[in-house]
Amino acid sequence: MAKKENKTNAMRILDKNKIPYRTRTYECDEFIDGIHVADLNGDPYDQSFKTLVTVGKSGEHYVFVIPIDKEIDFKKAAKFVGEKSIEMIHVKEINALTGYIRGGCTPVGMKKLFPTVIQESAKDFDEIIISGGRIGMQILLNPLDLAKVVNAKFGDIIVSQCL
């Protein structure tokens, strides 16, 4: 008898919404950053995305999905969501707020659907890679499908690269 895949909340929500996706696992006992995971799997950095959870001056929380090798531009991101300023939440708050842990945080299936912005470069790909909802699990899906299921907008929210 085949072993049943242990689905994460993110996978159950994608299934419920009939969103096609693939999953992939990697060996990891504890948090490692997205760059190390991409290196482990031979994935391009610009196609691999991390999920950042922030809080605005208003107290509202926001989720930003950006390439793993990029940094969020806090001024651009705040302006995009209509805040005076935003900052990252403390790591210790991630689980209580989202239901996920650091290294397994994904925009799909958080405890609450927060306003979400995906870096516009994601639209350059047919498939992007995000966390699968736990350490060692990834979800590969179309960025437009991701935006649809989390009601996200696309925007330029990363620090511009100066040449």
Image (cartoon, rainbow, N blue to C red):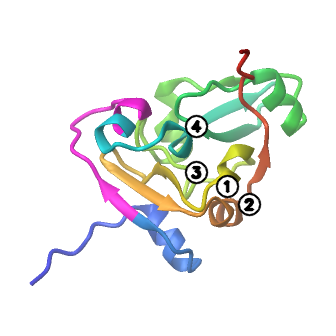
Left or right of residue 48: residue 2? left
Mark 2 or mark 4, which has the lower sequence index? 4
Q: Nearer the viewer, residue 90 or 16?
A: 16
> Tags 4 and 1 in contact by the CB under 8 Å rule?
no
- Mark 3 → mark 1, Cα distance in angstroms: 8 Å
Mark 4 or mark 1, which has the lower sequence index? 4
Of circles 3 and 1, the one toward us is 3
User: Which structural element holds mark 4?
Assistant: strand
- Which residue is at 23% across, 39% downward? 28
Amino acid at dot 1: Leu
Residue linked to disc 1:
113
Q: Is residue 31 above or below residue 163?
A: below
In what quadrant of the picture does the C terminus appear? top right
Left or right of residue 59: residue 133? left
Mark 3 or mark 1, which has the lower sequence index? 3
Of circles 2 and 4, the one toward us is 4
Q: Nearer the viewer, residue 47 or 58?
A: 47
Q: Is residue 60 above or below residue 20?
A: above
Where is residue 4 drawn, in percent x and y?
Answer: 22, 75
Amino acid at dot 4: Pro
Amino acid at dot 3: Pro
Mark 1 or mark 2, which has the lower sequence index? 1
> Tags 1 and 2 in contact by the CB under 8 Å rule?
yes
Residue linked to disc 4:
67
- Mark 4 → mark 3, Cα distance in angstroms: 14 Å
- Which residue is at 49% across, 26% downward? 91
Mark 4 or mark 3, which has the lower sequence index? 4
| Residue 107's disc number | 3
Of circles 4 and 3, the one toward us is 4
- Mark 2 → mark 4, Cα distance in angstroms: 19 Å
Where is residue 137 drawn, in percent x and y?
Answer: 34, 52
